[in-house]
Image (spheres, rainbow, N blue to C red):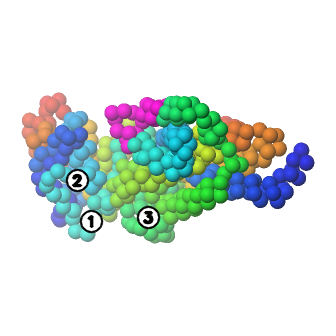
């Protein structure tokens, strides 16, 4: 399988403090990578670098053939942004096509079709014309995932997709992401707090253990290392 | 009352005073309501209020120093808008306290300077506005500004939506959100200064905030909110303007009251809708 994204010894800082040092890893097409690590370990900074919102202090991020950083479908960390915001599900999902639209001022019918398909794929067609402030937490995440699908060519980057969801909705979300990986052939990079769930679904684990120490390998290898013990309790 | 109406439409009054005020006022209300949608939804409502006080300070200083008011106030308010937007994003001084600090300081400077110089006339205009005294230059600037704002909203609508809804996601899709924030800061600053000369420093932020809140009571989509806010704002302005002329009330305050009236009506409609279970 070809590489879809590769980090070559990148270092990055947050608020003037170095949080990532010499991190290297490669994500192959079809991988399901979970990024774990404690708060402040640089997960969010890494996400910003991968998206191209922030440039690393040193090192290189190499995208796979024909892929640009803005072709990554991004699901941001849960915030209350949709709370009280007047926008229909359709409008929000369509805004995912902004990257591929380029400088053209209006969306064309192909982009509207992409948005419609993403809404259908995530099973929220009946909500398309509803306002996002009327949706439950799980429905909002589905809407934002549909938006990410519109932006994604092959790669989805999900930042703690189940935070704030009740257990049922969160299980549904894991199921759905797993399906997108297996059936739709999406490569997934997911930041997660839930190490146990990550080990169950992921094909690779990236652990940002400390500033200059990281682990990258299969869940089996991760479980065998001493690093996992403190997260999964032995 | 009918005599008043007849006087209103004489060529002397209508052509020379009322028509420019109407044109300028409609232009400014369109700008303030459209920009207001993003400001309110990004939780920057108080920026309009803060900027108007800063504008008041700048205009008073300009009046005392015998400088052209707009030439002083515009750059000062534009710079203040940049600083306030920047501060809102930083954690050291939270946005609302920064605005309170800046606006009261500017207000104090304005009052201090004008009271020392014994100037009251111009300065009270800026406090309460004087829409019928809009100069030809003010009207032209208002119309140009509204054209810029409307074209920005038409051609950059998708980006404006994305930056307003979720700035991080917008950045990830390659939108330079900082540029949009800066464009908005400049447009808001110019709108506030023009609106302030019309409505007064104390009331101009109502033009930014109330139409959006009104539209949000009823509309479900962003597009609906933008269009409704613009329409409600213009209608409120025209109704408030004629109300003030017929009843001889202060124009700025009349316009605000009409805006509040629409807000209450829309709130009632929204409440009835949600009670009857309509989504």
Sort mark 1 into few (<14), some (14-19) or many (20+) by Cα contacts within 10 Å.
Answer: some
Q: Position of residue A124 (x, y in %)?
A: 48, 52
How far apart marks 2 and 1 lie (CA) works out to 17 Å
Is residue B215 at all visible to an observer of this figure? no
Mark seen at residue A67 = 1
Q: Position of residue A145 (x, y in %)?
A: 39, 51
Q: Nearer the viewer, mark 2 or mark 1?
A: 2
How far apart marks 2 and 3 lie (CA) works out to 30 Å
| Between discs 3 and 1, the one toward the N terminus | 1
Q: Main secondary structure of the magenta part?
A: helix
Q: Vertically, is B139 above or below B50?
A: below
Q: Vertically, is B119 above or below A215?
A: above
| Residue at image mark 2 | A55
Element carrying mark 2: loop
Choose top left, top right, bottom left or bottom right for residue B211. top right
Element carrying mark 1: loop
Is residue A40 at all visible to an observer of this figure? yes
């Amino acid at each position: 399988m070809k590489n879809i994204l590769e980090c070559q010894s990148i270092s990055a800082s947050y608020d003037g403090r170095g949080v990532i040092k010499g991190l290297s890893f490669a994500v192959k097409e079809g991988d399901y990578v979970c990024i774990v690590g404690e708060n402040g370990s640089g997960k969010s900074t890494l996400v910003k670098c991968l998206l191209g919102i922030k440039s690393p202090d040193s090192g290189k991020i190499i995208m796979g053939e024909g892929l640009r950083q803005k072709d990554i479908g991004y699901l941001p960390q849960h915030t209350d942004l949709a709370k009280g915001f007047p926008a229909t599900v359709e409008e929000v999902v369509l805004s995912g096509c902004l990257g591929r639209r380029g400088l053209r001022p209006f969306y064309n019918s192909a982009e509207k079709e992409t948005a419609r398909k993403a809404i259908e794929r995530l099973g929220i067609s009946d909500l398309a014309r509803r306002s996002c402030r009327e949706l439950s937490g799980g429905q909002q995440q589905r809407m934002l995932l549909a938006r990410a699908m519109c932006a994604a060519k092959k790669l989805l980057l999900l930042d703690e997709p189940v935070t704030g969801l009740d257990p049922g909705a969160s299980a549904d979300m894991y199921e759905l992401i797993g399906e997108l990986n297996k059936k739709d052939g999406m490569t997934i990079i997911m930041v997660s707090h839930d190490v146990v769930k990550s080990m169950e679904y992921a094909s690779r684990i990236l652990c940002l253990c400390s500033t200059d120490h990281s682990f990258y390998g299969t869940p089996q290898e991760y479980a065998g290392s001493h690093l996992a013990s403190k997260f999964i309790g032995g | 009352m009918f005599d008043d109406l007849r006087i209103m439409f004489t060529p002397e009054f209508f052509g020379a005073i009322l028509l420019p005020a109407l044109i300028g006022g409609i232009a400014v209300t369109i700008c303030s309501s459209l920009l207001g949608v993003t400001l309110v939804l990004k939780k920057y409502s108080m920026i309009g209020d803060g900027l108007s006080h800063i504008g008041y300070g700048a205009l008073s200083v300009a009046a005392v120093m015998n400088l052209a008011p707009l030439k002083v106030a515009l750059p000062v308010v534009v710079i203040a808008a940049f600083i306030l937007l920047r501060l809102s994003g930083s954690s050291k001084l939270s946005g609302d306290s920064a605005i309170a600090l800046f606006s009261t300081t500017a207000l104090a400077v304005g009052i201090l300077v004008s009271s020392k110089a014994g100037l009251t006339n111009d300065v009270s205009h800026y406090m309460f506005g004087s829409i019928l005294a809009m100069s030809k230059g003010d009207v032209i600037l208002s119309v140009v500004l509204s054209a810029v704002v409307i074209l920005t909203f038409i051609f950059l609508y998708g980006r404006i939506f994305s930056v307003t809804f979720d700035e991080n996601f917008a950045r990830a899709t390659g939108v330079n959100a900082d540029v949009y924030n800066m464009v908005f800061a400049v447009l808001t600053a110019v709108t506030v200064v023009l609106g302030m000369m019309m409505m007064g420093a104390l009331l101009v932020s109502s033009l930014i905030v109330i139409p959006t809140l009104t539209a949000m009571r009823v509309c479900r989509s962003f597009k609906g909110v933008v269009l409704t806010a613009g329409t409600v704002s213009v209608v409120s302005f025209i109704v408030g303007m004629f109300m003030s002329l017929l009843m001889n009330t202060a124009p700025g305050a009349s316009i605000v009251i009409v805006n509040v009236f629409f807000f209450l009506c829309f709130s009632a409609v929204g409440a009835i809708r949600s009670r009857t279970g309509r989504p």
